[in-house]
Image (cartoon, helix red, strand yellow):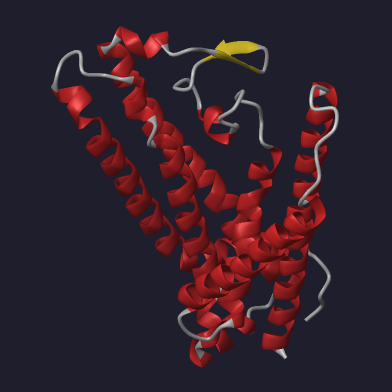
Amino acid sequence: MNNTFNIQRFGLLLKRQWLEFGKIYLISLVVALGVIVAFYGFALWKDFTYADSFSPNDLNFREPLFLIFGFIFISIIASSYFAHLGQKPKAIIDLLIPASTFEKFLTGLFFTSILSILSFIFLFYITDLAFVSKLRGMYTSVEQITPYVHNGKEVTSVDNIAYLFSKYSGHEKFLPLYFFPFFVTSVFLLGSIFFNKFHYIKTAICVMIFSGIWTAIVIKSGEWLFDGKIIIDQENRNMNHMSQNTAEWLGVLLIVALTAIFWSITYVRLKEKEV
């Protein structure tokens, strides 16, 4: 098979993979929507049942729900995409598809790193919008939450999903958070093609082990570099702001580099499977 990219063949491959993977994907979306609605209903049932019982703190569950459940959802989708390659009968059929390795790899990225992330954000957004709109109609105190500036407009923490991508302090955009989902999907996509069985569990265990090792290295390095030293010029806020921006961009570059590495390893592993 010619390994060059062909847009028409790629489109046909997307249609074929949707017929096979789409059923699992749609079921996962329905389950995810049910879980999100259930969490919102359980957390806000008191506000919908009893008059004058709303407090802004009742909405504090949204951020951890968005981050934690979003991580679980996109990682499960990514971990299941190439999982069938661990079974010889299914692997032979899939590997004999008349498409190049690069096209199969791009199809995997589309379903796991683009479609799954956008779908979860959309589901969470419409659910959040429905419940918050209901609260707005019941309580005027929803409108009294302290606003902050986003894209030149004053909005509150209940206005839109951009709040969920912001820092808690100052509500500024936290750049690495925008790229982190792609890193998560790249790790679990690699796990789906690297392991033959129990893909999600094995990948999650590896992630926990390496995360623990990496955290220990960073902490020990920080202690070795800064222990016993005193920060000079603490009042220079502009310099501190610049250092924060630099740290964020370094975080973005690190995440992008690691994501590209994991995608490259996944592509090589896919070629090895075909061989």
> Quick check: can you spot residue 81?
no
Query: Of all residues shown, which one is farthest toward the left?
Result: 50
Front residue of 213 and 166: 213
Please report the residue visible at 61 percent of the width from the left and 65 percent of the height from the top.
211
Q: In the image, is 26 to the left or to the right of 150?
A: left
Front residue of 131 and 82: 131
Q: In the image, is 204 to the left or to the right of 210?
A: left
Q: Where does residue 52 sit, x and y in percent of width and height?
A: 20, 13
In the picture, the quarter occupied by the N terminus is bottom right
> Quick check: can you spot residue 2?
yes
Judge whether 64 appears above or below 204 on screen.
above
Judge whether 44 appears above or below 151 on screen.
below
Quadrant assignment, res 235:
top right
Q: Where does residue 201 sit, x and y in percent of width and height?
A: 46, 75
Please report the residue visible at 81 percent of the width from the left and 54 percent of the height from the top.
225
In the picture, the quarter occupied by the C terminus is bottom right
Front residue of 105 and 169: 169
Please report the residue visible at 16 percent of the width from the left and 15 percent of the height from the top.
51
Q: How many marks?
A: 0
Judge whether 165 appears above or below 54 on screen.
below
Q: Where does residue 254 sit, x and y in percent of width and height?
A: 78, 54
Q: Where does residue 255 sit, x and y in percent of width and height?
A: 73, 54
Quadrant assignment, res 131:
top left
Query: Of all residues shown, which one is farthest toward the front?
Result: 228
Please report the residue visible at 37 percent of the width from the left and 34 percent of the height from the top.
127
Q: In the image, is 78 to the left or to the right of 99?
A: left
